[in-house]
Image (cartoon, rainbow, N blue to C red):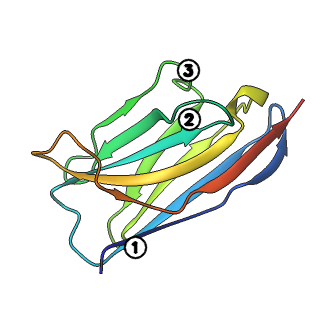
Amino acid sequence: QVQLVESGGGLVQAGGSLRLSCAASGRSFNMYYMGWFRQAPGKEREFVSDIKWSSGSTSYADSVKGRFTISADNAKNTVYLQMNGLKPEDTAVYYCAARHIFSTRYDTWGQGTQVTVSS
């Protein structure tokens, strides 16, 4: 059974840092992109960042570029999102997701982890 389990969310003051983790299990993800998305109350879910597991190539939303860093640990089958310089507008539920490299749709999702940034 394919599973993505996020952890690491919490409450932090503006300017602080958090590191989210996404533990992946149930298949080999070498042919997958792993992505982070977020959804704030009353807003649509939005792309944050992704990484191609096999090559390590990454992409970021403009809103987080320079502040967030995505990485993957193949030995632990875990993807991380290091978030620095957090702003109140980063407050959201953060989700980890996976899509095959030949697909345009993320079809495996974690349960989400809450990140709250106080001003």
Residue at (59% x, 55% y) in the render? 20
- Image mark for residue 68: 2
The number of numbered discs placed on residues in the rendered structure image is: 3
| First in sequence: mark 1 vs mark 2 | 2
Residue at (71% x, 47% y) in the render? 115
Residue 59: x, y in percent?
36, 31
In which quarter of the view is residue 103 placed? top left
Which of the image's four quarters has the N terminus?
Answer: bottom left
Q: Amino acid at mark 2?
A: Phe
- Image mark for residue 28: none
Tell whether 70 sits left or right of 67. left
Image height of 87 relative to 24, above or below: above
| First in sequence: mark 2 vs mark 3 | 3
The outermost residue toward the right is 119
Residue under label 1: 76
Which of the image's four quarters has the C terminus?
Answer: top right
| First in sequence: mark 3 vs mark 1 | 3
In which quarter of the view is residue 85 placed? top right
Q: Amino acid at mark 1?
A: Lys
Residue under label 3: 63
Residue 73: x, y in percent?
39, 63
Give the secondary structure at mark 2: strand
Residue at (66% x, 32% y) in the render? 42
Residue 92: x, y in percent?
67, 41
